[in-house]
Image (cartoon, helix red, strand yellow):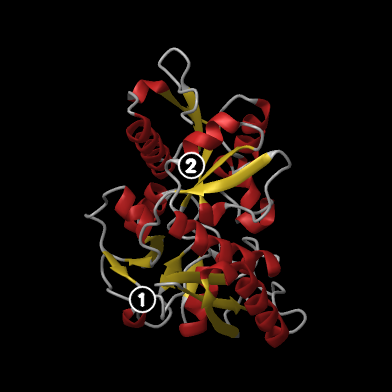
């Protein structure tokens, strides 16, 4: 049954953060909905919401509350009815949503890989001893120091443009961004090298856009069903079950990626000490429907291998 459709007089309100990448993701969501229901763009309204994570740029996320800082205000507006749907980068999303909200729609996933960004070097192995690398990701920091403990790491908070400016200003020799964001922003001019997942396993849900809604909004549920990408949902079900079982947040260096090969799901996972001194990794493969169970099982294996205190934070990261 066709849902009651929005119109220019009564648009569907799409909530998003205000960064250029977040806006690009909201526009992609709008355009997919418009195409699915043959609606004009002005049947949708993009509502920019400033989050705590966007306002506070001078401290690491682990010091000010974690991933929820990028979603709390948006979800409050969704619950209050100020917006109708919320568009998120899935790697920023906590594994649990507030009561009354559902996150069950995903757009087709982009390139999952990390990108090494430098105007003077082509990869991690090419960096001179003691070189400075900027990143705000504890996962990337731990993975980098696991391979190159000689490097110096500084905190790089901010959106893509802010981090690229810090790099251009010489604050660091290199940094990392997600290939997905660079592709969605058509930033072909950025000097980048895609990093193989065997060298740097990405964050859980990296490259995926999720759309959150109110659980009791059947009209929106019917509309979103028309643009949901099932393979992305199947992959994220396994990855986010893995993350949930590890009690994952931005304070724990965790990587995970599920791939589909025919009717088989292959899940890879990694946990690291924050200083990169140790890592544990593993994988599972099986039926797609068993993805969440595989995520739980793999998480239990890695937790057992890591032992108590593995994720304890022993050193800070210089801020710039």
Q: Is residue 131 visible?
A: yes
Give the left or right position of residue 256, taking residue 111 as reference.
right
Other residues around mark 2 within 10 Å, as few (<14) / some (14–19) / many (≥20) = some
Name the N-terminal-most of marks 1 and 2: 1
Q: What residue lies at 35% left-to-right and 78% top-to-bottom?
A: 127
Q: Nearer the viewer, residue 276 or 17?
A: 17
The image's mark for residue 228 is none
Give the image location of residue 69, x and y in percent.
63, 46
Nearer the camera: disc 1 or disc 2: 2
- In the rendered image, the residue lying farthest to the front is 1
Residue 133: which quarter of the image?
A: bottom left
Q: Residue at x 60, y 62 (%)?
A: 240
- Compared to 266, does 109 lie above or below? above
Q: Is residue 49 visible?
A: no
Q: Quadrant of residue 254?
A: bottom right
Residue 169 x, y percent position in the rendering: 35, 55
Q: Which residue is identified by label 2?
A: 225
Residue furthest left in the image: 189
Q: CA distance from mark 1 to mark 2?
A: 33 Å
Q: Label 1, on which residue?
A: 196
For numbered disc 2, what is the local secondary structure? helix
Q: Is residue 120 left or right of residue 210?
A: left
Along the line of sight, which residue is nearer the eye, 85 or 53? Answer: 85
- Residue shown at 47%/69% (left/top)? 202
Residue 257: % across, % down: 49, 70
Point 56% across, 67% down: residue? 289
Who is closer to the viewer here, 90 or 161? 90
How many labels sit on residues?
2
Front residue of this view, candidates 288 and 60 = 288
């Amino acid at each position: 049954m066709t849902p009651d459709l929005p119109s220019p007089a009564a648009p569907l309100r799409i909530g998003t953060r205000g960064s250029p990448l977040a806006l690009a993701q909201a526009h992609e969501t709008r355009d997919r909905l418009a195409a699915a229901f043959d609606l004009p763009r002005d049947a949708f309204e993009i509502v920019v919401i400033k989050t705590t994570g966007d306002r506070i740029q001078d401290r690491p996320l682990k010091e000010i509350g974690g991933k929820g800082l990028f979603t709390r205000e948006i979800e409050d507006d969704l619950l209050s009815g100020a917006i109708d749907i919320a568009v998120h980068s899935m790697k920023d999303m906590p594994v649990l949503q507030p009561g009354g909200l559902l996150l069950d729609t995903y757009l087709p996933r982009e390139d999952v890989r990390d990108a090494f960004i430098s105007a003077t070097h082509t990869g991690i192995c090419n960096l001179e001893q003691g070189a400075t690398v900027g990143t705000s990701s504890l996962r990337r920091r731990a993975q980098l120091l696991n391979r190159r403990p000689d490097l110096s790491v500084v905190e790089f908070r901010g959106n893509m443009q802010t981090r690229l400016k810090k790099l251009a200003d010489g604050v660091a020799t290199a940094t990392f961004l997600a290939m997905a964001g660079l592709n969605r922003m058509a930033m072909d001019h950025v000097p980048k090298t895609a990093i193989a997942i065997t060298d740097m396993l990405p964050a859980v849900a990296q490259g995926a856009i999720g759309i959150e809604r109110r659980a009791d909004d059947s009209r929106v549920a019917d509309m979103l069903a028309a643009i949901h990408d099932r393979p992305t949902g199947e992959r994220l079900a396994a990855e986010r079950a893995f993350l949930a079982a590890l009690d994952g947040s931005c304070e724990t260096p965790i990587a995970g990626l599920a791939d589909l090969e025919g009717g088989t799901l292959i899940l890879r996972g990694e946990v690291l000490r924050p200083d990169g001194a140790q890592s544990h990794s593993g994988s599972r493969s099986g039926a797609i429907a068993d993805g969440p169970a595989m995520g739980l099982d793999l998480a239990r294996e890695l937790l057992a291998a890591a032992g108590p205190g593995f994720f304890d934070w022993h050193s800070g990261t210089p801020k710039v």
